[in-house]
Each structure stands twice: as C-alpha cells, then as structure tokens.
Image (cartoon, rainbow, N blue to C red):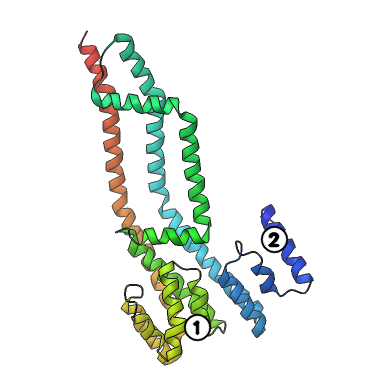
C-alpha cells in the first residue's frame, strides 16, 4: 500500500472484501471500471479460466513497464514546447498587469494620445484588471476541464477524432493507435483469447472508428470465413498494407501473436520518430511566434515613450 492514494487504498480494501466473500477476482475488478481497464479485466478472467493467472499478471506487469517507459518518452519530448508556451503567456500577463497600467497612467497624466496599437494593449489591460477573477476562473475551468477530459475514457476517444483531422498529428495518432491495437490483440491471443473476443475487447478501448471496424470484422466478416488479414484490407484508411501483409503471414505460419508484438514495437518506434520530427518543426515556429510577440510588445511600449519624449 506504500505510495497509494486514499482512493486507491479504498479500492484495494474493497477488492479484498469482495474476493473474501467468494467473488471472482475479475468480477471484483469489474466493479471499478475507472481504475481497471477492460483489457486487464479480460486478461484476469482468461487467467482464472485457464489457471495461468500468475503468469498472465506477470506478463501484463511487463507490458505496463513498457507502456510507462513509452509514455515517459512522450512526456519528455513535450517539455520544451510547454515551457516555452508557459513562459510566453506569463510574460504577456506580466506586461498587461504591471507595465501597461503604468504606461497608461503616464499618457493620462500628460494628456497625450497613444498610438492605435498601444490602445489595444490598454483595452486588454483594463479588461484584465476589471475582470481578473472571472478571467482566472475561466482559465482554471478550462485547465481542470481538459485534465478531467483526458482522464475520461469516452472523452479521450472524442479527442482522438479531432486529432485525426489535424494535418501533422494525424499520422502520429494513427501509428499510436496501431501500436496499441497490435499490442493488445497480441497479448489477448497469447493468453488464449479467440480472435473474435480479442478484437471486441481491444476495440472497446480504441477510437470510435476502430471500434466500429473491429466490431464489424469480429461479428460479421470472420463469421463468413474471411481471414483476419483480408477483413482488415477492407479498411485501408485504418489498417495500412504493411500491417495487413504481416498479419497474413502470421496467420499462415500460426505466429499471429508474435508478428503483432513485432508490429507493436515497429509502430512504437514510428511514434517516437514522428514526434521528434514534429518537435523539430514546432520549436522554430514557437521561437518565431515568441519573437513576433516580444517585438509587438516592445514596439507598443517603447515607441510611444520615445514619441512622448520627442514631443517635449
């Protein structure tokens, strides 16, 4: 229990009580869907049925370690842009709250008319000063809303739909989805799940487009005798040819779980590579934006002061 929050500790005690009353471990886990995802619950259920629960839990722990390392790489790659954006916003707020009001008092005391672009900053500063609390509450609500949206499984799936429409992020998002698809189906098949059940379970934690496609493949196409690879080829916008070709080979050789695990590693490398390219493009763009903003602030503050000095 070391390092666990009070909620997580309560969950453990509830699980202990449920198992002590004779409930299956998988049933007890299903009572906490926000803490335990459907894939983990399905793996535990398969382990209970086959008697291989310890080995399945150990395998899942290894996958969680890999996911943790992968997510840490993603977060590390986003640190620099976030720091740059935060510093820019902090600088703008500092100028609007501290510098602009004093400059505005100077113009008022000298009864001078500021330039048009300086008036814009005066208006923004007045608005921020008048509605400070509502503005802070708005940004706080946006921040908390975004945080809870990312923690909600259904909201994340709707966010995925938006990311699929962005020109740069769509490829990264697609590779990330294919990585999770390959890894999940591989793990489920390896633990003894039939392919149909593996597709239905994995589809439940993916984006809506993939969920619908996998459900159709599992419930309709596979039932008619179509191979898994041929069924995937009917959705070329979701499953690329390289993946379907490898899956076809895996089906023929009886190594479907193994080749899917290899494809998961491949797509993980593609996600990291795509993210590095994205950051290579974003960093200079952010620097240009920061330079433009700093230049506008400087011209709006310094130029009027020089005009005032020159008028005396």
- Name the residue at 41% across, 52% down: 78
Residue 293 % position (x, y)? 29, 35
Locate residue 54 relative to residue 62 in the image: left or right. Answer: right
Residue 311, compared with residue 27, is above or below; it is above
- Name the residue at 33% across, 64% down: 171
- Name the residue at 61% across, 72% down: 41
Which disc is residue 18 wearing?
A: none
Q: Is residue 186 visible?
A: no
Pick whichever, 128 or 275, lies toward us.
128
- Name the residue at 65% across, 78% down: 53
Residue highlighted by disc 1: 196
Residue 252 % position (x, y)? 41, 92
Which disc is residue 11 wearing?
A: 2
| SS type, badge 2 | helix
- Residue situated furthest right in the rendering: 21
Residue 26, compared with residue 247, is above or below; it is above
């Amino acid at each position: 229990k070391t390092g666990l929050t009070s909620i997580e500790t309560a969950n453990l005690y509830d699980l202990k009580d449920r198992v002590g009353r004779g409930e299956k471990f998988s049933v007890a886990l299903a009572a906490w869907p926000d803490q335990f995802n459907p894939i983990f619950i399905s793996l535990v259920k398969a382990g209970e049925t086959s008697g291989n629960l310890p080995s399945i839990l150990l395998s899942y722990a290894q996958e969680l370690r890999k996911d943790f390392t992968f997510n840490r790489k993603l977060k590390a790659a986003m640190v620099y842009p976030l720091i740059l954006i935060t510093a820019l916003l902090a600088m703008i707020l500092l100028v609007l709250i501290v510098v602009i009001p004093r400059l505005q008092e100077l113009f008022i005391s000298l009864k001078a008319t500021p330039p048009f672009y300086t008036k814009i900053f005066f208006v923004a500063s007045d608005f921020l000063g008048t509605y400070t609390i509502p503005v802070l509450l708005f940004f706080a609500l946006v921040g908390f809303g975004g945080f809870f949206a990312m923690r909600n499984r259904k909201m994340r799936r709707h966010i995925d739909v938006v990311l699929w429409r962005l020109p740069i992020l769509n490829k990264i998002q697609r590779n990330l989805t294919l990585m999770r698809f390959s890894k999940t189906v591989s793990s489920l098949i390896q633990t003894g799940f039939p392919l149909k059940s593996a597709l239905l379970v994995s589809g439940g934690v993916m984006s809506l487009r993939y969920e619908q496609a996998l459900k159709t493949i599992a419930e309709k196409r596979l039932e008619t005798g179509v191979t898994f690879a041929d069924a995937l080829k009917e959705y070329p916008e979701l499953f690329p040819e390289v993946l379907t070709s490898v899956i076809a080979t895996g089906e023929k050789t009886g190594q479907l779980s193994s080749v899917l695990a290899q494809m998961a590693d491949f797509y993980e490398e593609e996600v990291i590579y795509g993210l590095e390219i994205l950051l290579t493009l974003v960093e200079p763009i952010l620097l240009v934006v920061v330079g433009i903003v700093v230049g506008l602030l400087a011209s709006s503050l310094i130029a009027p002061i020089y005009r005032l000095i020159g008028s005396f």
